[in-house]
Image (tube, rainbow, N blue to C red):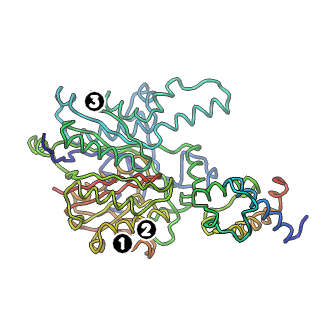
Amino acid sequence: MTNRRVAVTGVGVISALGPTTAEFWTALIEGRSGIAPLQSIPPGALRFSSGAEVRGYDPASYFTPKETGYLDRFAQFAAIAARAAIHDAAIEWTDSLRERAAIVTGTCIGGQSTQDEGFFQLYSEKTNRLNPLTIPRTMSSAAASWISIEHGIRGPVFTLSTACSSANHALGHALWMVRQGAADLAIAGGSEAPFSLGMLKSWELLRVVSPGACRPFSKERQGLILGEGGAMLVLEPMDAARARGARIYAELAGFGMSSDAHHLTQPSAGGAERAMRRALDDAGLAPERIGYINAHGTGTIANDATETAAIRQTFGAHAERLAVSSTKSMHGHALGAAGAIEAVATVLALANGVIPPTVNFLGPDPACDLDVTPNHAKRAHVECALSNSFAFGGLNAVLAFRGV
Amino acid sequence: MSDVSGMSEDVSRRVIAVVAATQHLAPETITLDSTFEQLGIDSLDGIGILFAIENEFNVSIPDDDAKSIRSIREMVEGVSKLVAAAGETGAALAG
């Protein structure tokens, strides 16, 4: 079978910017951040106090009590995003499509909140009793399984975990499956729910979380802000999408991945550059065709300077003409969900001709001398865009999108 | 109660002991003038050292202070200030 072009026909996202795609996009273009004082953790327990939490989230609005018992918060976010994406794509399910549809989800830490809570009861409260569903709630693939069960999807279903690149690896593999005919439709993305005290303490000790705001690429940036949420995209062959009259947000045109082979936490510009080049090659795009990059842009000293260097190495003189932004400044760093949330931001930027900003920008850092779309969204009809994810451990995954 | 230089000597010895233990180095290979670079200590190693130093001296080292530390001498100076600020409680507890 010849390679098929792959369309994004549905998106769904639940994040700190709200429980719907519409609220997500409105906040992004208004430059409104969802980062606020943490509500899930008692104040004073940590050196940092802010996070990008999904506020006012009530599982009962989405799940029966029985389902809530089955699903950790991370799996709930994935299921909610998948429902929204499937609804958005107006998929016309048939028995054979369900048989030929795939699900690929990404998560960094899966159902760690369930484990944190249960092990606290066991070790500290000495209850000697755990939630009997601890194993199915904790497993990283629970989100993929639940989406499969809920929608009767019976094709290839699996989960990838590559730290902060998880969702981009998931989307990239889903792209390749649909492109090569291993699946006729895919639901792919990621979800994360990292707000347990044990997990946040662990992040505190890495000394990469900002005690104040998240200001990617800015002078005086102090680190990342953790986020939670889920995002899913519906991918299907371009011809099939056109034939059924589906709305097409963008083409997912290419995927590139690489490993730094360097360090467990320090990034390397060479590895990031290779992933961007491979995404461009896979999409058959010259670098000059790219107009926007949704950056990994965590807001740490090291990432943003290294990513800037990598973009310059990849694009040369064209780097001066790129619009770059880090939407993490608004939805936080949602780890294994980050790539999916940012993929939604990227396809909406292409479809709407608006580049979302990097907020909290105080002024340029000479080590980050790109146009990072500071503080305000801008109108720009760009032809193609990249979305970068560069994980701890040097695992890089980049998606290339083409506007339609 | 030791004077400032005595405190510094005690802090130096203990900082070097912590660095040696966490990095699996012989303490005699580490001096006040050793830089982290010379000792092969990268950012991830530094996080482990800071954690162990906080335990040793019962102090909390702010992220911003930690970022600028590049040598054993800078670490000893920083820890001495924190210990002095804590009224030697940390030294008494850990010692």
Which dot, 3 or 1, sits closer to the camera? 1
Mark 3 vs 1, N-terminal side: 3
Q: Quadrant of residue A60?
A: top left
How crowded is the residue under tag 2: few (<14 C-alpha within 10 Å), some, or many (20+)? many
Question: Mark 3 is on which residue type?
Answer: His
Q: Find numbered disc 2 in the image and state the secondary structure of the residue it sits on.
A: loop
Near mark 1 (Cα within 10 A), the count class, few <14, some 14-19 or many ≥20, is many
Q: Contact, CB < 8 Å: mark 2 with mark 3?
A: no
The answer to which image quadrant residue B65 occupies is: bottom right
Q: Are marks 2 and 1 in contact (CB under 8 Å)?
A: yes
Q: Earlier in the sequence, mark 2 or mark 3?
A: 3
Provide the residue designation for mark 1: A370
Q: Mark 2 highlights which residue?
A: A217
Residue A176: give x, y in percent of width and height.
Answer: 24, 44
- Whether residue B53 is visible to the viewer of this picture, yes or no, is no
Label 2 in the same subunit as label 1: yes
Q: Amino acid at mark 2?
A: Phe
Q: Is the residue A337 above or below the residue B7 in the image?
A: above
SS state under label 3: helix
Binning the other alpha carbons within 10 Å of mark 3 as few (below 14), some (14 to 19) or many (20 upward) gives some
The subunit carrying tag 3 is: A
Vertical arrangement, residue A282 with respect to residue A233, above or below: below
x, y percent for residue A28: 34, 59
Tag 3 residue: A151
Tell me the quarter of the image containing the C terminus of chain A.
Answer: bottom left
Instruction: Say which label, 2 or 1, has the lower sequence index.
Output: 2
Can you give x and y, in whole percent of width and height, for residue A358 in the image? Answer: 38, 65
Question: Which amino acid is tagged 1?
Answer: Leu
- The quarter of the displayed image where residue B70 is located: bottom right
Secondary structure under tag 1 reads loop
